[in-house]
Image (cartoon, rainbow, N blue to C red):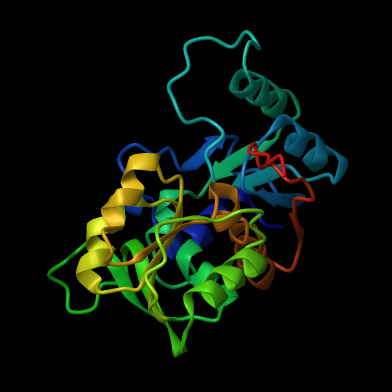
Amino acid sequence: MTTIDEVIQYLETIAPLHLQENYDNSGLLIGMTEEEIRGVLICLDCTEEVLEEAIRLDCNMVISHHPAIFYGMKRFTGSNPTERIVRMAIKNDLSLYAIHTNLDNVLSSGVNERIAKHLGLEVKSILRPKMPSAEKSTTGAGIIAFFQEPMPEVEFLQLLKERMQSEVIRHSKLLGVAIERVAICGGSGSFLMEDARLAGVHALVTADYKYHNFFDADGDLLICDIGHYESEQYTVNLLQELISRKFPTFAAHCTGINTNPVHYFT
């Protein structure tokens, strides 16, 4: 018998809750910690369709990267997706757990390390350490990674597109330099622009870049916006692998549903 609490304790040894950003809402959102787990469904976004999938698979715990409940709620009338998700979860005895910026902010077994592995990059260090005074910080925002051999910019963009399954990459002006040293931040990472510049990277890989922020590259590096969902999609596989290795007594499933709310007309 494995309880929800045991899974939570394990996940929080990898990504402790105190590492989440102050705006975040990671942790157990709905459910009782003493309940026995029949199965776990892992997703990037907890949607109504994902909860229906969990019910079909007889999973009574859903672990998402993005919190299903992000803002304060004052009523449950079913007038928006969040209210309907809460109602469905409670009605079907589903426990919802989120592991968001606390998983973003760890070096080992974190979101950004998984991106680096998919791109064939070797991880060097945290980009913006939580504890700047530490000799080698293992927690903080973004990572710095590098290729063993420099790669032409266009080849690098093609690699990004293929490995991260991005339909389109928005990027700043090509600089005509080889890409070797890369900063990575899954999700919204424009706030790390100056850190990337100071670190001397050739490219910053992230998402959710605004039009005017592309000017900030200023000829110093290549900004690559690969899409929010695309940058974090492999977090699902990461969590499934971690849980399956630790708990062989129940099934940990990756959702089969693409929850990306962004679509492209090509």
Lateral position of residue 134 relative to residue 65, left or right: left
- From the viewer's perspective, is residue 5 above or below residue 81? below
The quadrant of the image that shows the C terminus is: top right
| Residue 146 place in picture, x, y as percent | 41, 82
Q: Residue at x 32, y 76 (%)?
A: 125
- From the viewer's perspective, is residue 251 above or below residue 245? above
Q: Nearer the viewer, residue 175 or 51?
A: 175
Count of numbered badges drawn on the protein? 0
The quadrant of the image that shows the N terminus is: bottom right
Q: Nearer the viewer, residue 222 or 131?
A: 222
| Residue 210 place in picture, x, y as percent | 39, 41
Q: Nearer the viewer, residue 146 or 31?
A: 146
Q: Residue at x 19, y 64 (%)?
A: 131
| Residue 262 place in picture, x, y as percent | 63, 38
Lateral position of residue 95 relative to residue 196, left or right: right
Q: Residue furthest right?
A: 56
Q: Is residue 92 visible?
A: yes
For residue 90, which quarter of the picture? top right
Q: Residue at x 41, y 81 (%)?
A: 178
| Residue 66 place in picture, x, y as percent | 53, 43
Q: Residue furthest left?
A: 133
Q: Is residue 18 visible?
A: no
Q: Residue at x 43, y 57 (%)?
A: 104
For residue 117, which quarter of the picture? bottom right
For residue 16, which quarter of the picture? bottom left
